[in-house]
Image (cartoon, helix red, strand yellow):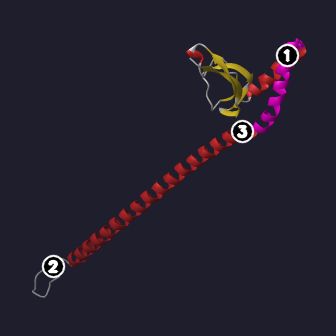
Amino acid sequence: MKNEDNEIVPEDLDDSIITEEHAGDQVKKLKEKLKIAEEKAKEYLDGWQRAQADFINLRKRDEEARLEFLKFANADLVLQLVPVLDSFELSLPHGNKELEAIYRQLLSILKSNGLEENSPKDESFDPRKHESIGTVPVENKDDDHKVLEVIQKGYILSGKIIRPAKVKIGEYHG
């Protein structure tokens, strides 16, 4: 084939150059689309990972709240049983072995459900845990503000004071 200047030009040269230029444009456009798609995929993956982390955190908070609820769900029942423990303790010095066995069984059940006794004899007085109902004069300075008598045991349920111990504390007058 000859062009206008009478030069011999292969027929498919013009078409192949056009096709190559067109293919280059298409590759460039496809690369741009691929880049956009990869950015969107990363954005979606990041969003999914954040949502998954949020869900895991929500489940943890829900489980913690459930456990906290269970800890104190029976607090009212335990509070109602504390005077029964007091009554048992008043009766125990009279030597009734059956009564003592029942008391120990009840106390064991309550302890397995988070109840702790607080009988703070010889401990330093702590107004957060103890209720002072009187003082005892002492001659030894080391006994000042020390619990010398426990009038009524205190009780702690799952780390929370449900009844402070009623105590008499030493008072040094020097």
Q: Is residue 55 left or right of residue 97?
A: left
Q: Position of residue 169 (x, y in %)?
A: 65, 22
Q: Are marks 3 and 2 in contact (CB under 8 Å)?
A: no
Of the two numbered discs 2 and 1 in the rendering, the one whose residue sits closer to the viewer: 1
> Is residue 117 visible from the viewing direction of this image?
no
Of the two numbered discs 3 and 2 in the rendering, the one whose residue sits closer to the viewer: 3
Residue at (67, 40) in percent of width and height: 68
Residue 73 sits in quarter: top right
Residue at (74, 30) in percent of width and height: 113
Could you tell which of marks 3 and 2 lies nearer the N-terminus?
A: 2
Could you tell which of marks 2 and 1 lies nearer the N-terminus?
A: 2
Of the two numbered discs 1 and 3 in the rendering, the one whose residue sits closer to the viewer: 1
Q: Position of residue 98 (x, y in %)?
A: 90, 15
Question: In the picture, which quadrant includes the N terminus?
Answer: bottom left
Relative depth, front residue between 32 and 67: 67
Q: Which mark is residue 72?
A: 3
Magenta extent: 74-97
Q: Residues within 10 Å of mark 2 (few under 14, many from 20)?
A: few
Residue at (32, 71) in percent of width and height: 26
149 inside magenta stretch: no
What kind of element bears circle 3? Answer: helix
**Residue ID for mark 1:** 92
Q: Are marks 1 and 3 in contact (CB under 8 Å)?
A: no
Q: Position of residue 152 (x, y in %)?
A: 75, 25
76 inside magenta stretch: yes
Could you tell which of marks 1 and 3 lies nearer the N-terminus?
A: 3
**Residue type for callout 1:** Leu
Q: CA gap, disc 1 to disc 3? A: 29 Å
Q: Residues within 10 Å of mark 3 (few under 14, many from 20)?
A: some
